[in-house]
Image (spheres, rainbow, N blue to C red):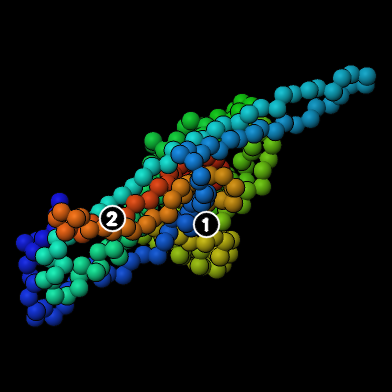
Amino acid sequence: MTTGTANLPELLWPGIATIWGDTYRRYPPLWNRMMILRRSTKAFEKEQGVTGFGLAGAKGQGASVPYVDMLQGYQREYVNLTYGLGTIITRELMEDEQYNVINNVPRMLAESMRQTEETISASVFNLGFTTMLGADGVSFFNSAHPNVRGGTQRNIPGVASDLTQASLEQAYIDIHDWQDDSGLKINLMPEKLLVAPANRFVAEKILGTKFAVGSADNDINPMAGQLDLIVNPFLTDPDAWFVLTNSRAGATFMRRRNAEITRDNEFDTENLKTKTTARFSVGVTDWRYAYGASGS
């Protein structure tokens, strides 16, 4: 597709008071507040789990100490993809256009790529209850994450629930019950609350109210000030909410190449081509990075 004077005829004549539609305020970067950024140097990267040992048992006098094998944990592979978008402008349009709109093309393309990164990053959570699989082979948010040494764990509520003070308190309790793949207790701490705009005010009331939300009693609200709130308009389920922990592996943005803008003129046509490309991948390694609820 080539953009010529026929595509933008009104820009060829003086007299327009305002050019609008490409000057809206945009959201600041959000993906880097909910994803772990890793730099890639290859076509694909692997994250490998290693499993420790379980509890020690009593040893009888003169008996041998029980020995167990060290096991390889689950592995997650990230295959880097190239994303791109471009436009072609005729020389005639560049010469005749009166408002320097064509000079904004690189900025428009940059915003398109930035929102592409946001949309694909948010898909880790949007698809987390269905097709976004973690290293253990089940969905990111699941009631039966398999441990390497046996048994299962969950990072969703036992009963589907909307975001309330009570359900957020239960999320804290559930997170503190998590174990590693050998059944040993782990000390992961909730750090952030991720919600769609429809849940923003509910979240702000829970995190910003000193006393119990929606109650006439004098009960304190232990959730006040506990979590950093992230309101993300790229989340597609208005009822879904997520608590992010300080796990060192989890929802990952694997950056192979930063977004860049390039432009060139074709010799024969004298058209100006401008494009943006970037290479990255997203996915989930350790489900313990987040607790998710899809709402009731």
Between 175 and 245, the one lying in front of the other is 245
Q: Which of the two discs, 2 and 1, labels the residue nearer the N terminus? A: 1
How far from the left and from the top, in percent, is residue 268?
Answer: 15, 54
Identify the residue under disc 2: 275
Q: Residue furthest front?
A: 267
Name the residue that disc number 1 marks. 192
Q: Secondary structure at mark 1?
A: strand
Inspect the image, locate mark 2, and give the three-letter code of the amino acid beneath it.
Answer: Lys
Tell whether 89 sits left or right of 231.
Answer: left
Residue 288 visible in the displayed image: yes
Is 165 placed left or right of 266 in the picture? right
Amino acid type assigned to the residue bearing label 1 in the image: Lys
Quarter of the image with the C terminus is: top left
**For discs 2 and 1, the disc positioned in front in the rendered view:** 2
- Circle 1 packing at 10 Å, graded few (<14), some (14-19), many (20+), is some
State the image coordinates of residue 94 (x, y, percent, origin top left): 16, 67
Near mark 2 (Cα within 10 A), the count class, few <14, some 14-19 or many ≥20, is some
Extreme-top residue of the structure: 63
Using the numbered discs, state the Cα–Cα distance from disc 2 to disc 1 in whole angstroms: 36 Å
The residue positioned 70% from the left and 27% from the top of the image is 70
